[in-house]
Amino acid sequence: MRDAGFAMLRRGARFPTVSGLLVALLAVAWCMPLSAAAPPQAASLLPADIRAAGILTLATDAHHPPCESFAEDNRTMIGFEPDIWNAIGARLGVKIVPVSIDFDGLIPGVQSGRYNLAMECMSDDTQREKQVTFIDYAYATAVVYELASTASATSDPLSLCGRVAAAQIGTDFVASLEHVSQSCIAHGKAPLSIRQFPSNAAVLLALYARRVDFMLNDLDAVSELKKNAPAPLKVTDVGFPLFTVGAVVKTADIGLAHALLAALQELHADGGYAAIMKKWDITALTLKNPGINLASAR
C-alpha cells in the first residue's frame, strides 16, 4: 500500500473520481513520518512509573565548575552537566530535580534508590561499573595544578616525586596519585605525600594556602579555576589517560539507562550536545558516540 501511493504519483496517474483521489492521498499519508505530537523514541523508553511521576531525582556535587556549580543566587545550578541533564529531561518529558551532596555519597545514594541518577563528571571505570550502570557522554582527563610561583612539574610524571599532593576523597584523582607514587618508588625516588580532602573547595584552599605543592583536577576546569584563583596557576599535563564520564543509575534500572542513552543520542542528532560543549569551551572533550558502560565495553 505504501509503495502504491508513491507509484501513482510518480506515473502522473489520473484520478477520475473524488474517491480515487482520496485513496491515493491516504496511501501517501501512510508513507509520511508521524506528526510532532507522537512521543519521541527516548520518552517511549522511559519506565512507566517515572513517566507517571513526571520527575527524575538527580544527585550531584555542585562545586566543580564547569561541570556544575551554584550561580550567584546560591540555588541555581549551572554548568555543562546541568545543561545536559535539562536537555535530557526535556526530551524525556520529565522534570529533573537536582540536589547537591558530597561526592562520595553519589553512588550510595543511587544504589539505595534515594536518587534516580547521579551526574558529576564521574569517570567510568570497571570497578564502579560493578556498583552502578554508566551512561557515558563526554571525555575527561586529569592535569596538575600548581601555584605558578612554586611550580616545578614537567610532562614527566616523575617530576612529582617527593612532593605533597592533594585530591578530593572518593575521586579517581586519588588512585592516579597513588599510581604515580608507586612509580616513583619503582624508579628509586621518594613517594608522594597524598592528602585527601572532603570537597573540591577544600582541595583548592589547601593549594592556595601552600599546605600542598599541587593538586589534581579535570582538564575541563582550567578556565574556571584560573579565572577565580587568588594567585596565578600553572597547569601541566603529565600524561594521565583519557577516560569517559557519565551519569550513573542503579544496575537494575536498565530501562532508565536506555532511555537516558536515547535522549543523549537525540541531543547529538539535533545539534544540542555540540552547542552545549561549545558554550562551555570544552569541545575537545566531545564524546561523539555516547554509550553504556564504555570502560568495559571498550
Image (cartoon, rainbow, N blue to C red):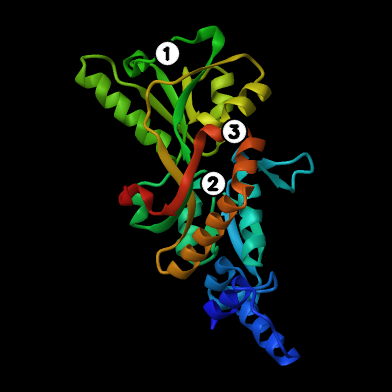
The mark nearer the N terminus, 3 or 1, is 1
User: From the viewer's perspective, is residue 266 above or below residue 23?
Assistant: above
Q: Is residue 288 left or right of residue 44?
A: left
Q: Which mark is drawn over residue 153? A: 1
Of badges 3 and 1, nearer the viewer stands: 1
Q: What residue type is labelled 2?
A: Glu
Of residue 154 and residue 29, the one placed in the foreground of this image is 29
Q: Distance between the residues labelled 3 and 1?
A: 22 Å
Q: Mark 2 points at which residue?
A: 120
SS for dot 2: loop
Q: Residue at x 37, y 24 (%)?
A: 239
Q: Distance between the residues labelled 2 and 1?
A: 27 Å
* 10 Å crowding of disc 3: few (<14), some (14-19), many (20+): few
Q: Which residue is drawn at 78% across and 39% down?
A: 72
The mark nearer the N terminus, 2 or 3, is 2
Q: State whether residue 297 appears in this view.
A: yes
Of badges 2 and 3, nearer the viewer stands: 2
The percent coordinates of residue 218 (x first, y second) are 50, 32
Q: Distance between the residues labelled 2 and 3?
A: 15 Å
The percent coordinates of residue 202 (x first, y second) are 57, 32
Q: Are marks 2 and 1 in contact (CB under 8 Å)?
A: no
Q: Which amino acid does label 1 sit on?
A: Ala
Q: In this view, does 89 lie to the left or right of 113?
A: right
Of residue 10 and residue 143, the one placed in the foreground of this image is 10
Q: Which mark is drawn over residue 210? A: none
Q: In which quarter of the image is residue 133?
A: bottom left
Q: Mark 3 points at which residue?
A: 201
**Image quadrant where one finds the N terminus:** bottom right
